[in-house]
Every structure is written in structure tokens, then in C-alpha cells.
Image: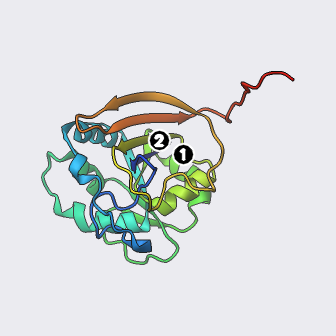
Amino acid sequence: MSKLTMTTFLTLDGVMQAPGGPPEDPSGGFGHGGWLVPYFDEDMGKFMVEVFQRADAFLLGRTTFQIFANHWPRITDPSNLIATKLNSLPKHVASKTLERLDWHNSSRVSDVVASVADLKNRYPRELQVHGSAGLAQTLIEHDLVDEYHLLTFPVVLGTGKRLFGTGAVPAAMKLLQTRATRTGTLIASYARDGKPKVGSFMLDP
């Protein structure tokens, strides 16, 4: 059985909306699209290659799928591992309405919560989620993410879609690894580690 992993680009205040460019997701009047681009560097590129090397399949939200489908099929260099993986491996799209899935090896998942266990049973290593803000909220709300890879960039935006919303299930996390890039991005990987533990520094009455 595979792990369901989520790799997400975040600002310091937790925004994940439209990191790669203004057209990605301007919903809600978001005007900061492309905030990640100035911080991209070789260190980040190497980490993303490591992530995609472990992929057996992808679970994507509708918007992210459409963004990827408009971009990655045009990257045909066989030495580009990320393009090769995305263009060849199975892509499961969480959508109740999307009808056309012309990108190679793509299929629609209408009930993602009910389908996750079956999808994980199909693959030995990782079922990967990238971006997909709406899908991320659903998976987090139902405690279905096994590991998070969070790339936190040194920028604060104040508005935009955030990874952990009000529906997040309380959970403790175990730090698996951390590193920093030359441009100041912090990369941290976490695995679920049960329920949050609490204590108190209050003095006894």
C-alpha cells in the first residue's frame, strides 16, 4: 500500500494560492500570483526531483490538473524527470463535473474520500498530491494525509487560500527531515503522529 503524500508551497502566513503565476488561481481577487518565482533555486529543484522520483501516481484537484495539463505535456525532454513522471504516470482527478480528461493516463474520481483507500492499495510507494487547495482541505478534514512536504518561502501575503483551514483535524506531527535553500526557503517533511498532546506550565493553586 502506498502513502498519500502532500507537497505544498507556502508563504510564512500559510498561503498556498497561485504560487507559480497570476493566471493559476485569481479567485477571490487574489493579486499575488507568482509569489514563489523569485525564490526558486537549484536547491528547491533538487528537492522536487527527489519527491517525484518516489511517485507511483498522482491525486490532483481539478484546477491544478488543468494547470498541469496545459503545461507539462509541452515539456518533452526525456531528461526532465518531473515532466516524464507527470506525463506518464496515472493521474486521478478529484472532480464531480470535469468531463474531458485528454491528458494521458488520467481518470476522474467523483468521491475522493471514499476512493483514497482503494487508490492507495493500487500502488506500492507514493500517491502524491501537489497543489490542489480545495482537495487538500478535504483530505486534511478527513485525516487522510500520511506525510506532508511543506516548502515555506520567506514572504507574507496576508490574503489567499491557506493549507490548514478551520476544518483541519487536530493532529501531532513527527518531523522527518528539514533543510533550507539558498534563497531562504525552509523545506520540512512531517508524518502523522497521533493526536496532539497537551500539558500545562501553570502553577498549582
Between 64 and 187, the one nearer to me in the picture: 187
Snapshot quadrant of residue 104: bottom left
Q: CB under 8 Å between callouts 1 and 2?
A: yes
Residue 60, x across and y down, in percent: 42, 59
* Residue visible at 49% across and 48% down in the picture: 122
On screen, residue 191 versus residue 49, left or right, reads: right
Snapshot quadrant of residue 186: top left
- Label placed on residue 174: none
**Secondary structure category for the residue under label 1:** loop
User: Which amino acid does the dot numbered 2 rest on?
Assistant: Tyr
| Mark 2, residue position | 148
Residue 121, x across and y down, in percent: 53, 46
* Residue visible at 50% across and 60% down in the picture: 135
- Residue 98 appears anywhere in the view: yes
Tag count in the figure? 2
186 is higher (above) or lower (below) than 115: above
Residue 164, x across and y down, in percent: 54, 51
On screen, residue 197 versus residue 178, left or right, reads: right
User: Which amino acid does the dot numbered 1 rest on?
Assistant: Val
| Mark 1, residue position | 145
* Residue visible at 46% across and 28% down in the picture: 176
Quadrant occupied by the C terminus: top right
On screen, residue 121 versus residue 195, left or right, reads: left
162 is higher (above) or lower (below) than 169: below
Disc 2 packing (10 Å; few <14; some 14–19; many ≥20): many
Mark 1 to mark 2: distance in Å?
A: 7 Å
* Residue visible at 22% across and 34% down in the picture: 182
